[in-house]
Image (cartoon, rainbow, N blue to C red):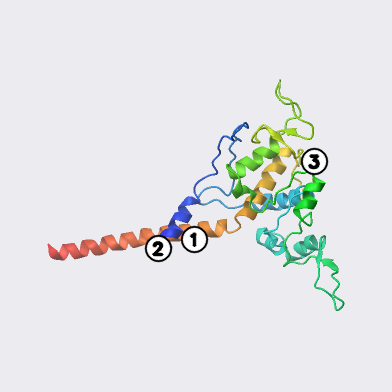
Amino acid sequence: MRKIVTLLIVGISSMAVDTTVHAAGGGKTPPAHQWSHSGLFGTFDRASLRRGAKVYREVCSSCHGLRLVAYRNLIDIGFSEAEVKAIAAEQEVAAEPNDDGDVEMRPAILSDRFVSPFPNENAARAANGGAYPPDLSLMVKARPGGANYLRGLLIGYKEEPPGGVIVPEGMNYNEYYPGNMIAMASPLSEDGVEFADGTKATVEQMANDVTTFLSWTAEPELEERKRMGIKVILFLLILTGLLYVVKRRIWSDLH
């Protein structure tokens, strides 16, 4: 019974849309966006997932890792096995030591996790002026506001900050980032990628798509969990009806 109740709670929680909060120390509340995967019956937009994966690979992956996701997981969002093998083969990973104990490099395969852009944190900081680009696997769940915050961050860069605001050297003004000053320069630019489906790669479109993709990496079981939640709700409704009928019959005999 405890398992059923837990599943019911989890299923119902899927109906909640991403909430936003005012960031401490400055930063506007990011605008709410209507995500296809929000709500009890929401599912991931497969076309958006594919576009978002492209944005991640061609833009974000130069600085940010995705260490909790294996290449084979891309098959779950509509990529063919051949496509994923080609994507994986673009990267190299360390092979098993040979007979002489030397470690050589080999192309990544389906079972490998996404290759990180830097071998360690120190190398990442050294390449980014001391700033550490965080791993994006769980980023949507790790930030207040979730998907809305991440989308807001990507579209919130301003070339000209408000009057009176001085942007320190090496920093960038972002109206949705806490404190408004962020070391990361705007990663997106108009037509920064070319989508295979012909969708125009505006900054907002790329922000929507890569946020959808990162929502999936943070919660790949979301659709399955929602389906289970619906099944549990239906089961409890039927059980409630049956118990009501049994109760009526028992009490009718006593009368």
- Label disc, if present, on residue 191 of the rendered structure: 3
Labels 1 and 3: the sequence-earlier one: 3
Location of the N terminus (image quadrant):
bottom left
Q: 84 above or below 206?
A: below
Q: Amino acid at mark 2?
A: Arg
| Residue 249 percent across, percent down from the top left | 21, 64
Circle 2 crowding by C-alpha within 10 Å: few under 14, some 14–19, many from 20: few
Q: Residue at x 29, y 62 (%)?
A: 243
State how far apart marks 2 and 3 are (Cα). 51 Å
> For this rendering, which residue is in front, 220 or 39?
220
Q: Amino acid at mark 1?
A: Met
- Label disc, if present, on residue 228 of the rendered structure: 1
Q: In the orientation shown, which residue stands out farthest toward the bottom?
A: 99
Labels 2 and 1: the sequence-earlier one: 2
| Residue 22 percent across, percent down from the top left | 57, 34
Q: Amino acid at mark 3?
A: Asp
Circle 1 crowding by C-alpha within 10 Å: few under 14, some 14–19, many from 20: some
Q: Residue at x 83, y 67 (%)?
A: 106
Which secondary structure, mark 2? Answer: helix
Which secondary structure, mark 3? Answer: loop
Question: From where the camera sits, is residue 197 visible?
Answer: no
| Residue 172 percent across, percent down from the top left | 75, 33
Question: From where the camera sits, is residue 5 visible?
Answer: yes
Which secondary structure, mark 1? Answer: helix
> For this rendering, which residue is in front, 86 or 199?
86
Q: Which residue is mark 2?
A: 2
Q: Residue at x 42, y 57 (%)?
A: 233
